[in-house]
Amino acid sequence: MASNTGSRPKGESSAIYIEPVRTETIALALIGSTPLVFNRMSEKSKGDILYPKPRKTSAEKQASLKHDVMQEFTASPYTLPDGDALLAVMATAIKGAMRTAALDLPGASKAQIGRLVYVRGDYVPVYGIPKLFMSVVRQAGMTRAPDIRTRAIVPVWAALAQITYVVPMLNPTTIANLLAAAGITVGIGDFRQEKGAGNYGLFSVTNAEDPAFVALRQSGGRDAQVAAMQNPAFYDEDSERLFTWYEAERARRGK
């Protein structure tokens, strides 16, 4: 019976050659095309998950505030202890957007991008002036009951991400194109394009020397953000009306 393996030609090496791999890092600036809505889970919500409170009676519900608007506003963004920006998004949000964008693009899979790319650091600083945003949302569950949620929103924003990728599988052009696609089809933050109903958190990609990015970094840095978080302006008329009604009702109830 003939062998299935055949014979190796004389002089051919039996060694397996693997091309060397290495990583490179590129800095890319994101400039918002639509407002960025922060969606960090508050410490209070995390605490309620970790140590649930007993159900309130009807009387207790009437006597207590369901929402603390300013507390919800200040808790909605991730914040940095130092640096030239106060506000931030998780680095995994940007990587996640790139992974999702790969689903719609030929040449790479979501799993491949997940293995070959990472965004450096835990958080990416965001530049821009936050405002108070109150909107109607639908709660999870079968009833999908409406609720009001208060968050910080940055109408005009920018960010700077340090993206590390594996060479030779990827190159700077591929990374920039993938991030740009994520900025058009996915976005970051709440109500983003990826979810279908919203179109917030979209962005374009440029470099750190772009005058538009430099201007946003200078005008929307830490000092301006701290002041805006302490004394916020309203994003729109609906937010202002809701907040005004809330404050009047809270005063009427003696809260």
Image: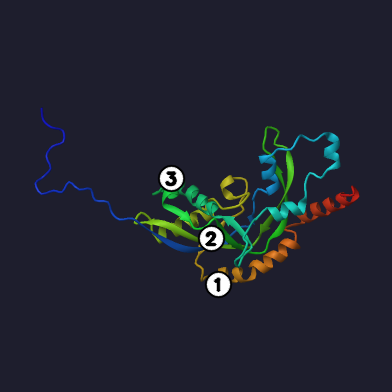
**Closer to the camera: disc 2 or disc 3?**
3
Residue 55: where, in percent of width, then height?
77, 34
Disc 2 marks a residue whose amino acid type is Ser
Residue sticking out furthest to the left: 10
Regarding residue 105, the answer to whether it shows in the image is no
Residue 194: where, in percent of width, then height?
56, 47
Q: Is residue 29 left or right of residue 74?
A: left
Which residue has dot 3 on it? 111
Give the residue displayed 71% in from the left and 46% down from the top. 44
Give the residue displayed 80% in from the left and 53% down from the top. 243
Dot 1 falls on a residue whose secondary structure is helix
Disc 3 marks a residue whose amino acid type is Ala
Disc 1 marks a residue whose amino acid type is Pro
User: Residue 211's mark?
Assistant: 1
Label 1 vs 2, first from the N-terminus: 2
User: Residue 178's mark?
Assistant: none
How are the colours assigned in the image?
A: rainbow
Give the residue displayed 71% in from the left and 59% down from the top. 131
Dot 3 falls on a residue whose secondary structure is helix
User: How dense is the environment of label 2, judged by Cα within 10 Å: few (below 14), some, or many (20 and up)?
Assistant: some
Dot 2 falls on a residue whose secondary structure is strand
Which residue has dot 2 on it? 204
Residue 88: where, in percent of width, then height?
60, 58
Q: Nearer the viewer, residue 44 or 148?
A: 44
Q: Is residue 133 left or right of residue 103?
A: right
Q: Nearer the viewer, residue 247 or 194?
A: 247
Residues at marks 2 and 3, CA–CA distance in whole angstroms: 24 Å
Regarding residue 40, the answer to whether it shows in the image is yes
Label 3 vs 1, first from the N-terminus: 3
Q: Is residue 108 left or right of residue 63?
A: left
